[in-house]
Amino acid sequence: MNTDLLERIPGVGEHRFDAEGVAVVAPAGVDELATFVRWARAERIPLWPRSSTSLRRSVRPDGPGLVVDMSGLKEIIRVDRRNRVTLVQAGVTFEELAPALEREGLRAVMPLCPRRGKSVLATHIEREATIMPAFQWDLSDPLLCLELVYGSGDQFRTGSAAGPGNLDQQWASGEMQKGPMGPGHADWMRIVQGAQGTIGIATWASVKAEVLPRIETVHVGASDTLTPLVECAYRLLRKNAVDICFIVDANAFVDLVGTTEGSRAEAARRTQPWNLVMSVSGLDYLPERRHAVYSRMLRDEARAAGVRLVDPPLGSGETLLALLRRSSEEPYWKERRRGASRQVFFQTTLEAAGAFCASFAVHAAGAGIDTDRIGTYIQPQLGGRVAHVELIVACEPGTDEVAETGRFADAVAVPLTAEGAFFSRPYGAWAEPAFEAAASSVDILERAKTIFDPARILAPGRLGLKGNPDGYAF
Amino acid sequence: MGSVLGVSGESTLTEEEAAALRDEVVAELALVVGDRWVTAEPAILDGYAWQYLAEAATGERWMARPLAVVLPGCTEDVAEIVRHCNHKGIQFKAVSTGFGAWGAAAQPDSMVQIDLRRMDRILEIDAKNMYAVVEPYVTGNQLQTEAFSVGLNTHIAGVGGQTSVLASATSMMGQGWDGVSMSFSCRNLLGAEWVTPEGEIVRIGSFESAGRWFAGDGPGPSIRGVFRGFAGALGGLGVFTKAAVKLYPWEGPEALEVGGASPYYETEIPEHHLSALCIVDDWKGMAELGYRLGDAGIALAVSRNAPSVMGAVLTADNNEFADIYEVPFVHELYYTLVVIIQADDAEEFAYKVDVLKTILRELDGGMIANLPAHEYTYWLGRFIRTLSRRVKAKGLLKSAPGTLGLFRTFGKRYGYRKLTSSMSALLYEAVVRSGLNMRGVFRFGGTFWTAMGSLASWDNAIKGARVGAQIKKRYIDEGKFFDDGADNAWGGLYENGAYSHLEELACYDPTDDDSGANVIGYIFETNLASAEHFLSLPLNACGPQASTFFSPLCGGYQNWQLAIKNTYDPNNASEGSSYVIPDYKPGRGLRKLAGNVMSDRAEIDLTQDDL
Ligand SMILES: Cc1cc2nc3c(=O)[nH]c(=O)nc-3n(C[C@H](O)[C@H](O)[C@H](O)COP(=O)(O)OP(=O)(O)OC[C@H]3O[C@@H](n4cnc5c(N)ncnc54)[C@H](O)[C@@H]3O)c2cc1C
Ligand SMILES: Cc1cc2nc3c(=O)[nH]c(=O)nc-3n(C[C@H](O)[C@H](O)[C@H](O)COP(=O)(O)OP(=O)(O)OC[C@H]3O[C@@H](n4cnc5c(N)ncnc54)[C@H](O)[C@@H]3O)c2cc1C
């Protein structure tokens, strides 16, 4: 690695090599970041933004260049109960944010038990699925406004955070960075979101939060097949009766709740083939009444759909709720089965999810992966209009299984895309089939890249976007 | 005169050149769509130039005539027309339902008007996954009618149910009465088919990959962000030929019972629906009411309507309005929100209504609603008590004859049996069907425009409404605008109060020669105040002029908009006078007007109680 280059970096207080020898810079704020990006642009040096802390393969750069590590920006700048919003710097994690919001009477909008070290900003800037579809009005939710530096080195704030006025002036005027669109005739946040770091690097985000219920209970609907659960979820989401709402098969449920060998064995004995996990809440006004009305609807709809209401496979409803409101315990739940895993995820509709799961199992069998290694997690999004389908394939670290699983996970996107799966977040090798199937978008994205990152220094190669025609400095 | 809406100017062609070009264009486009669907008949071209708000854009009653009007029948036609315009070096602009100056030509003989009215089909309603796919000429009420029949509903922009769903979602704005439960137009977009300014057909979202329209973002970054922000490109970045939009649960009958004949509609409020006019004491109470309703998540619609607009909606003509607007009880109905509730069954309905009552009790407010008789009376009593704190004993006495007169009129019109519910029913019709708006804004002076209205926190929106009213009062005092009590802020909550908007409507007479200058002065002054009071970007922060003003205050976004325009429309073929003009410089007229406004402005005093 080129240490001379590191010595020449301007304006960035700190740089280092991480445990794996990757050169890392950690800008202390937006001005420093902008100076640094302008320098990298002039020098044609690839930059790989990250905000979470973890040494998973996925957060390492895909090629040469410098990692821009935003994980040290740890401030929760604001929590505003009245406007149900929080403003967080890039490095704030869910284990930090969730309790901070609860203290103010709010709950965080979270993915299903995110791994420790997972940045809130990175999660939402990647449009990761969250577990409360009723509160998701747009797939961009809960992300509202961003402060960022484009690949060009220009600073920008999106949405109502753009101005007029700085944060203090806006706050004094009662504006809490809640308008997600604009400024003007484009949605700048939306162009950065889902870009895997290829358009800009964000320093903070305003994020929607929801009222912390006075009462919330978790319920598990069980079934031997998926279809009744899908029916039940459709009906309850349509009635706005449930807050948390997702589906897991037995493997994924065991992984989610069981941390020790003993607890996993017990959970495996008690869990059902398919499970719809839901919560019903009572908010500030007439909480018992609200809870009673929607609990009754939940029971009625479960019965109508032929879904059995059962106890959680481990612990009580309360312990399950506590678990769902926090980051995952170690080890990360998706890695409990065999120590590591690869996930294959895409979007479809709820009623089509079952066929994709079945097809996935066939593809997996073809690659010698038996169903015991696959966990299924189906997350309704956007009020039930979209399903995030995630198949978690377990593998054993230190064995060939890891590489084999990786190859399979990379390759399976091809047949799944052909069957109609929508890889809306196409990481790594998935980009190729995803953009082949969305060919009319490619030129639009290429041109957007040119606007915001003219030297193509940000995460080059991701999303199949072309690199700098003159190459890079290293 | 330059305008805040668009830029107008003289033709660059001689009359002979223009005539020759028109003939050429008509002949060539006829090869694409057939003779029947293209014309340059002056009378027809004038139909496209006669536009709402033309006086603000051009200083006259008319927009410019386009070169020709073409009516494509399908996406491929559109693409071919667009490619043809690029090839010929002329501009084009699409209209869907064509409800304003934005869609029309700013400069004579400069562009081909693409009128999309032949593309009028609802292509799909996916009832299970709650979305619809529509062509440009599908209107809000058309989609709503079909959606009701499968237990769904659609967001309708406040312009009214007779305008295009697609235009609002892809290209315009999208404020509406029902935002609290059905969001803002562009946030409901689940993908679109886009003929780019160069004539490429792009399909955005899941459709191209999956053959279904359930998701509008990805793969990767969302292209929705390129063509649509707080506002769309208002025709300046290609043509949208299909849009998929979210639908929402409708807990009502397959069709609403609407009786009577225009203008005396009678809508039956369905079972388990409440239509309530809720009142509190002041703006502080309004702020609390809004935040609490947002938190509670019980409402289908939450809308603030000033007394003048409500008076107009409730009455059939200006004479009737004048009579009731005199009544202090009506005239002073400033601090009210219309709240519509729907529920799945009796138990949920009772819960939701009880939450509303709890909130109103906390705020010492009342409501007029379609409640059972004894409750109606109790809550009406509270309503009158709250209002009496404003109008005092004198106002109370003064109101008695007028109120009785109003009851008599309504009793005769709708039947005395329906006396208590008729007002709720009218408000219900206005809000749920977005059906009575035109009377609210066009009847007084002939037209209206609006200001402030950023999408922001509710506290901030209320502050904006107060600033807006103080500015407008001067225009009323000077006789430039109709006297609607100054505070005529309309708006409400979106996404259960996640954000909100209040815009300051101004009604005026467009036949008055100065009306264009007056309204632009108003827009400029309110824009200025929005910046000074940190009220976020107002709805008039659109188009080249306003972007030039606001851009330096908001991170230079105009430079990025320019980059988008230049990148995706290198030939500047898509007429962008209300969006981005590549070489735009503010004209002398506008600079002079700005100077005038700046030298003589309303004083804003937010320490005083309003009104
Ligand atoms: C080859 C490959 C394979 C993958 N396989 C899997 C898999 O099996 N399962 C799975 O769940 N995911 C997988 N991913 C996706 C990966 O997990 C995602 O990137 C995920 O979002 C990581 O999030 P993180 O919390 O580690 O965030 P980070 O790595 O910190 O960031 C996530 C993404 O957001 C960008 N980003 C981070 N911070 C910022 C910022 N401040 N501003 C702008 N952009 C920023 C990053 O560049 C990155 O693309 C894979 C990715 C790759 C490249
Ligand atoms: C009484 C009244 C009230 C109003 N209230 C509101 C309100 O509450 N909320 C609100 O959002 N707006 C409001 N408006 C403004 C405006 O009329 C609306 O935004 C309306 O949605 C515009 O739709 P339209 O079909 O009438 O558009 P059109 O006039 O057809 O088009 C509007 C703009 O979009 C462009 N456009 C239309 N279709 C396409 C297409 N297919 N492809 C590319 N560009 C296209 C046009 O060029 C034009 O610039 C109001 C207007 C009036 C007259």
Image (cartoon, rainbow, N blue to C red):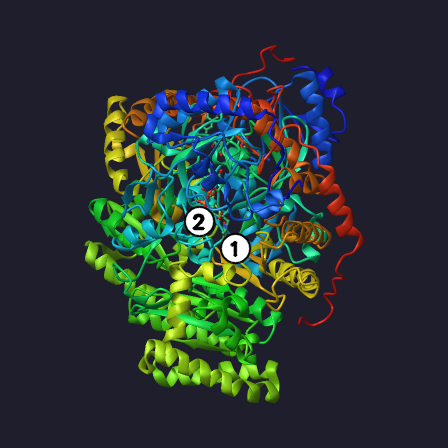
Q: Quadrant of residue A432?
A: top left
Element assignment for label 2? loop
Element assignment for label 1? loop
A21 vs A409, nearest the viewer: A409
Whole-percent x and y of residue B422? 37, 74
As measured in the structure, the alpha-carbon distance from the residue carrying label 1 to the one carrying label 2 is 10 Å
B18 vs B226, nearest the viewer: B18
Label 2 marks a residue whose chain is: A
Question: Label 2 sits on what residue type?
Answer: Trp
Task: State yes or no: Cβ of the residue under disc 2 lies below 8 Å from any atom of ligand 2.
Answer: no
Mark 2 burial class by Cα count in 10 Å: few <14, some 14-19, many 20+: many
Q: In this view, does A353 lie above or below B582?
A: below
The image's mark for residue A137 is 2
Whole-percent x and y of residue B600? 78, 56
B179 relative to A419 in the view: left or right:
right
1 and 2 marks on the same chain: no
Q: Quadrant of the N terminus of chain A?
A: top right
Q: Quadrant of residue B577?
A: top right
Asked if disc 1 and disc 2 are in contact, CB closer than 8 Å, the reply is: yes
Which residue reaches farthest top? A470
B277 relative to A417 in the view: left or right:
right
Which residue reaches farthest right? B599
Q: In which quarter of the image is residue B258?
A: bottom left
A469 vs B467, nearest the viewer: B467
Residue to which mark 1 is pinned: B498
